[in-house]
């Protein structure tokens, strides 16, 4: 199956009219997904290793400058225990995700990776620990890490600078992604849908960027405001504005940059973009993200039925789960959790899919 790449103007047109396209795109995406993965859904055990972060991204609940955030770090033993538990449940990929926390030193992470590879030799290790130097990424790769998730967040430098403090640079992020690819990681990137001030053109540019990068994994999810961040009221302000203007609402299916921010639209648009990404990247690993499931009760199944093929249940210790507080109401609902795999499996079976237990689920571009 060859990839289908879109031009910028095609993407803008598709996104602007996504409500008219979403059914046919979801059908096509499902067809491609079934062709490549049959009815299989991969699971990854997500271990949130630290809620400390040296960055202060304006949208993120664990930003350094949120003095209300509860901070924790898992010990190596706690992490290994969670892997052991996850392994028994049938997980064969562990994701270490965390804020940019240098207490998790290069060598400490490297040792942890080696230990996991020694104890669970048929497992993949995915890292999601933010920006580090090439020598660090190399050390971790040599220790046995397989994959790295680093969302680019916004391919447009202007939007990137609206979402991040000046010391964070888009250039650095893009360079890190290139480095990860060069070192042979299966690399993941992505962005938030309906991020503050994001326009349709921005989303088109994000997809163009992904077409260029050709990542193995693509994570997208709706933006959800967190009340202790500078964007706390972004959605409320917006909803007030649209209420006032509701008489002007046109009945056409066209969306404008503004309409992106209503929560229903963000979940629906995320699903449409999952379908579009599945069509562009037939073999990619695309999760139905926790953010999507937080915003919409049916987010996870909607994501799968739009072409996603990965679920990342939370494998963090129960006590710390609520502290990894990226956005408001982050879903800790039962099925998000590793303890509830049976119910998750039932949910997948009901919509015609099955969970691939005991499988790593690798994909590597040539
Ligand atoms: N809403 C949705 N997603 C968020 N992330 C961080 N903060 C938010 C938020 N408020 C996403 C970012 C990051 C990933 C780990 O979580 O895209 O890369």
Image: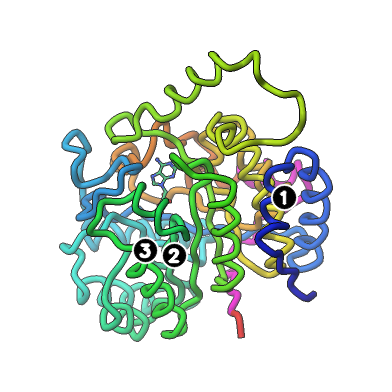
Q: Nearer the viewer, mark 2 or mark 3?
A: 3
**Residue 43 in the figure: left or right of residue 85:** right
Residue 40, image x, y percentages: 71, 60
Mark 2 packing: few (<14 Cα in 10 Å), some, or many (20+)? many
Distance in Å between CA atoms under marks 1 and 3? 26 Å
Q: Along the polypeptide, which appears first: circle 2 or circle 1?
A: 1
Marks 2 and 1, Cα distance to the nearest angstrom?
29 Å
Instruction: From this view, report whether residue 248 is shown above or below residue 29.
Output: above
Instruction: Locate residue 230, reporting x and y percent.
Output: 29, 35
Where on the picture, by quarter, is residue 283?
bottom right
Q: Label 1 belongs to which residue?
A: 13
* Residue under the image location 65 percent in, 18 percent down: 248
Residues rendered magenta in the picture: 343-364
> Residue at image x 33%, y 37%?
322
Distance Cα–Cα, label 2 vs label 3 = 16 Å
State which mark lies toward you, 1 or 3.
1
Locate residue 291, reporting x and y percent. 50, 42
Please name whichever residue, 125 or 149, is drawn nearer the observer in this view of the structure: 149
Whether the magenta-drawn stretch holds residue 94 is answered as no
Quarter of image, res 233: top left
Whether residue 297 is situated above or below residue 275 in the rendered picture: above
- Location of the C terminus by quadrant is bottom right
Residue 165 tag number: none
Q: Is mark 2 within 8 Å of ligand 1?
A: yes
Q: Image check: 164 left or right of 126?
A: left
Residue found at x 42% / y 73%: 177
Give the residue pinned by disc 3.
170
In the drawing, does residue 193 fall left or right of residue 97? right
Instruction: Determine the secondary structure under disc 1.
Output: helix
Identify the residue position indicated by label 2 in the image: 149
């Amino acid at each position: 199956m060859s990839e289908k790449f879109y031009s910028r103007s095609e993407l803008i047109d598709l996104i602007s009219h996504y409500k008219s396209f979403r059914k046919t795109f979801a059908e096509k995406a499902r067809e491609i997904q079934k062709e490549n993965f049959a009815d299989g859904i991969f699971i990854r055990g997500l271990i949130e290793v630290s809620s400390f972060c040296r960055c202060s991204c304006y949208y993120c609940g664990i930003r350094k400058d949120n003095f209300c955030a509860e901070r924790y770090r898992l010990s190596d033993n706690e992490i290994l225990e969670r892997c052991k538990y996850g392994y028994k449940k049938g997980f064969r990929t562990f994701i270490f995700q965390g804020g940019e926390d240098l207490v998790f030193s290069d060598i400490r992470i490297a040792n942890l990776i080696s230990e996991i590879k020694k104890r669970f030799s048929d497992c993949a290790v995915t890292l999601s620990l933010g920006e580090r130097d090439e020598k660090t990424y190399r050390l971790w790769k040599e220790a046995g890490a397989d994959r790295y998730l680093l969302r680019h967040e916004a391919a447009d430098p202007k939007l990137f600078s609206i979402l991040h403090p000046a010391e964070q640079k888009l250039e650095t992020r893009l360079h890190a992604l290139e480095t990860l690819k060069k070192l042979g990681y299966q690399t993941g990137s992505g962005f938030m849908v309906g991020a503050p001030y994001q326009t349709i053109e921005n989303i088109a540019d994000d997809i163009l960027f992904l077409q260029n990068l050709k990542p193995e994994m693509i994570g997208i999810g709706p933006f959800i405001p967190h009340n202790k961040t500078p964007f706390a009221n972004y959605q409320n302000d917006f909803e007030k504005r649209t209420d006032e203007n509701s008489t002007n609402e046109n009945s056409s299916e066209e969306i404008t940059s503004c309409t992106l921010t209503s929560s229903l639209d963000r979940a629906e648009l995320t699903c449409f973009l999952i379908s579009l990404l599945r069509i562009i990247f037939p073999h990619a690993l695309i999760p139905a993200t926790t953010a999507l499931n937080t915003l919409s009760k049916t987010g996870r199944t909607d994501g799968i039925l739009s072409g996603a093929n990965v679920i990342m249940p939370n494998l963090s210790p129960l006590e710390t789960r609520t502290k990894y507080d990226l956005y408001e109401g982050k879903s800790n609902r039962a099925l998000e959790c590793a303890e509830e795999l049976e119910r998750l499996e039932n949910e997948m079976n009901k919509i015609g899919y099955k969970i691939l237990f005991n499988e790593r689920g690798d994909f590597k571009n040539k």
